[in-house]
Amino acid sequence: METASAWCTPLGKLSVRQICLFGMLAALTFGAKWVMAALPNIEPVSLMVMVFGAVFGWQGLLPTFVYVMAEILFYGLGTWNINYLYVWPLLAVTAYLLRRMEHPLGWAVVSGAFGLMFGALCAPVDVFIGGWGYAAAKWVSGIPFDIAHGIGNFVIALVLFVPIRKLTQRLYGRMERHP
């Protein structure tokens, strides 16, 4: 259930409605993460970024980057922001490439694997900042958090990816039919 224009419209050709939609989705993602902040490494961001990539194609990078900018504005600059600039888009592109996958278990596995690999995906920045030893120590010490992240991502995606994807597709399709 793809909308043709979501895959064909260049990134530079956005309607006012698309700009508003992407901004609201980024804000929703930020707010949902903030609400769940008490749960260590259990977050809805992976779910939403996968939905962005699967539903909006390359344009799914836009709400992803707006989300990252909201993180920077709210929490300030930090080394994790550098990671967010490539880790979240990597997940959006992965979802775009897997967009034809329908089964929730497949999306749960992708999201869970992403959570498990999050520390390893952030390690290149740590190598640059503190060297190989620093990066390895930080990654290994973060493995329990990556495990929690992976389990949380798996459960959230298993339960919510398909319904949120369908809702987003339906709302986006309705928006395109009524300009």
Image (spheres, helix red, strand yellow):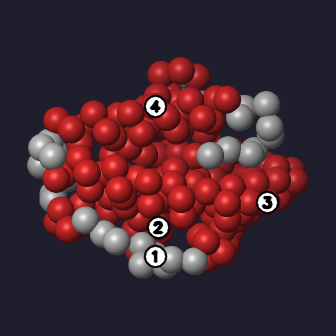
Q: CA distance from mark 3 to mark 4?
A: 24 Å
- What residue is pinned by disc 3? 151
Q: In front: 32, or 135? A: 32
Image quarter of the N terminus: bottom left
- What residue is pinned by disc 1? 98
Where disc 1 sits, the SS reads loop
The answer to whether mark 1 and mark 2 are in CB contact below 8 A is yes
Q: Is residue 90 visible?
A: no
Amino acid type of disc 1?
Leu
The mark nearer the N terminus, 3 or 1, is 1
Where disc 2 sits, the SS reads helix
Mark linked to residue 95:
2
At 24% from the left and 61% from the top, the residue drawn is 6
Q: CA distance from mark 1 to mark 2?
A: 5 Å
Q: CA distance from mark 2 to mark 4?
A: 20 Å
Q: Which quarter of the picture shows residue 156?
A: bottom right
All told, the count of numbered labels is 4
The mark nearer the N terminus, 2 or 4, is 4
